[in-house]
């Protein structure tokens, strides 16, 4: 049996299997936060479940900003909305 890692959505704070979440990663060198679509980027991750309400909620509550303690462009949330 494969173990699927569980991660928490920054908006609803529920745990989901990693593949049901959108992963955000902060680049250690540039400090830039990106969406990790290929699940290949290294670095600390933040997650939002694939639910349009959670993306909106995370944007409103600045969930990703608070997780990484840095600014995040609104565009990143628009990109996330396209993935839900
Ligand atoms: Zn959620």
Image (cartoon, rainbow, N blue to C red):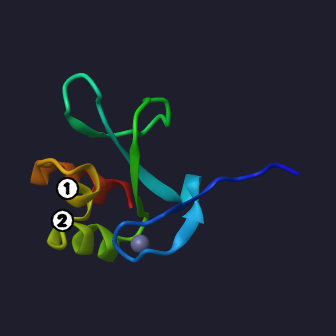
Q: Is residue 80 left or right of residue 12?
A: left
Q: Secondary structure at mark 1?
A: helix
Q: Is residue 71 above or below residue 58?
A: above
Q: From this viewpoint, which residue is outermost toward the right? A: 1
Residue at the spot of label 1: 65
Percent position of residue 23, x then y: 41, 48
Give me the residue at 29% from left, 30% from top. Answer: 27
Residue occupying the far top of the picture: 29
Q: Residue at x 40, y 34 (%)?
A: 43
Residue 83, percent from left and from top:
37, 54
Q: Is residue 49 left or right of residue 78?
A: right
CA neighbours of label 1 inside 10 A, class few (<14), some (14 to 19), many (20+): some
- Other residues around mark 2 within 10 Å, as few (<14) / some (14–19) / many (≥20): some
Question: What residue did someone put label 2 on?
Answer: 62
Please state the horizontal and vertical placement of residue 80, each as a whole percent of the image: 29, 54
Label 2 element class: loop
Classify residue 41 by image quadrant. top left
- Residue drawn 11% across the image and 48% down it: 71
The C terminus sits in image quarter: bottom left
Residue that appears at 42% across and 53% down: 22
- Do the CB atoms of the residues marked 1 and 2 lie less than 8 Å apart? yes
């Amino acid at each position: 049996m494969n173990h699927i890692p569980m991660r928490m959505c920054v908006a609803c704070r529920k745990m989901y299997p990693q593949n049901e979440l959108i992963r955000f990663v902060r680049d250690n060198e540039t400090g830039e936060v990106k969406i990790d679509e290929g699940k290949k980027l290294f670095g600390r991750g933040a997650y939002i479940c694939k639910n349009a309400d959670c993306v909106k909620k995370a944007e409103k509550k600045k969930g990703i900003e608070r997780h990484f303690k840095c600014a995040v462009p609104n565009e990143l949330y628009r990109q996330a909305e396209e993935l839900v």
